Amino acid sequence: MTIKKRIFIANTGMVLISLLILLGIGGTIVELFNNEFMKIIEQNSQLAENTYEVQGLLLTAKKQDINWEKLSENLGTYNFELYVSDNNGNQQYSNVRDSEWESIEELEDSEFVSDKVILYNMENVTIAKCRITHGDIDYNVYAAYYPGELSFMGMDRGMFEMFLIVFIITGILAITALLFCSQLLTKLLIKKIMQPIEELNLAAKRINNGDLEKKIGYKNKDEFYEVCETFDSMQVHLKDGLERNAAYEKARTEMISGISHDLRTPLTSVKGFIKGMLDGVATTPEKQKQYLEISYKKACDMEILLQKLFFFSKLETGNMPFFKQRIELGKLVENYAKEKQSELQEKKVTVQFDSDKLEHVVNIDIEQMKRVFDNIIENSMKYADIDHLVIQMKISKKNNSECICITDNGRGVEKEKLPHLFEQFYRGDESRNSKNDGSGLGLYVCKYIIEKHGGKIEAMNQGGLSILIELPKHAQMPIESEELYD
């Protein structure tokens, strides 16, 4: 269930349950009021039980000396209270309660009948009133009775006050129930929302402490599900990235160490031959020329190694420049094959070119593309493991691509190693003591350059090792100057 739906249901539930509680409490109180309070009101809607005895006491009091205390005491035996005021409305005596006084107050302006005691029943209050004259003063005398069972918590109240009390109590109970219900549902909702947040927080702490194994594994299908799944996926990618970086650093360190080792060997040779010349070991012009030629060759070898380091540095920093030109690829590859054949003839390497006689227009950096060809041929020379190496460069079309296939007649590469040939620092033989030792950068550089041209490169076994390069073809154009292909 989604968080949005959960919040909607929780809020709806709070309102619905609150209304049900309010209706329940209200209904219960109304029912109690109906069954109990109204029953009592009905039972007490008639005159009090001892009203006529009280009436007799008041008639007797008319004929005796005034003693309000004594009269109040006599009335008290019948649960009546006494209230007396003079003609001016000034209170002379009173022991009535609030509920009784409210009813008496309504009768103060009513008329008195001489020699009679008038009886009233007002809001369950039984009142007997008469006028007693003593000397020149007339006294308004009221005897009032209010049923004790209609009092609330020991307090006497009128009907309106009772209604207010019941209303207030109902409101307090309803508000308390609503608050409790709201708090309960809110806590449940917060718990549901906070659970994935706490799990994310714990996962972040685990990652911070280097633990990349344990996943969150959040199962609820809500808004947090995708977040937690993304977090788990990020954790996997982070772990893979750290492992790749560790492997990369190890390989890079080995490569730098290897190139340093490779530099030390020719440098030692150069120093040895120069020292020999300085010490007079090379006494003849022929010997001196031999020493100088060997020193020059070793210096050239060091230059090549340094160029590799420099090229790798530009590759890593993204500063490799590309100057692309629209050219006819067939002519470029043909001229390159001829040049390479002449260069490698003494090393028993044959470079052949095979064309489909079609025009292959591309937009490439010529020097970088030649670097790709050089690296592929150099790789074949190192690992073909054959006495007379034959390298064939064939050009063709494939859909919207111009293809160059460079194949040797060597022993090929193990099937499981083919997908790794273009990885950074990868060497088929991991031992630097191998006679065919390399930096592991040659084919990686090829992949980098080809992808920068928008193409792709792959390796396969076709007799020997075969490298297929696909470049996006360009719009037809007039053939450029021959100088571009030299």
Image: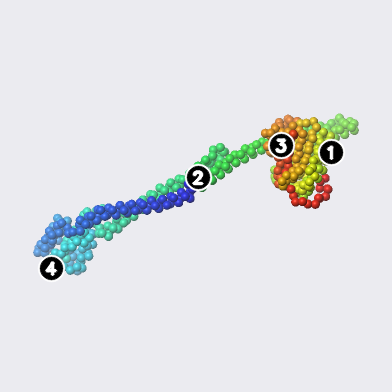
Residue at screen point 30% across, 58% down: 164
Residue at screen point 74% across, 43% down: 403
Q: Which residue is mark 3?
A: 460
Residue 28 appears left or right of 342 = left
Where is residue 414 shown, x and y percent of the image?
A: 70, 32
- What amino acid type is highlighted by mark number 3? Met
Find the distance from the CA under tag 1 to the CA under tag 2: 69 Å
Where is residue 194 shown, x and y percent of the image?
A: 48, 45
Circles 2 and 3 in contact, beta carbons < 8 Å: no
Circles 1 and 4 in contact, beta carbons < 8 Å: no
Rendered image: mark on residue 342:
1
Give the number of callouts.
4
Q: Which of labels 2 and 3 is toward the front? A: 3
- In the figure, 149 relative to 447: above or below? below
Q: Residue lying at the far right in this picture: please name it.
A: 285
Find the distance from the CA under tag 4 to the CA under tag 2: 89 Å
Rendered image: mark on residue 221:
2
Question: For numbered disc 4, what is the local secondary structure?
Answer: loop
Where is residue 398 shown, x and y percent of the image?
A: 73, 44
Q: In terms of image quadrants, where is residue 109?
A: bottom left
Q: Which of labels 1 and 3 is toward the front? A: 3
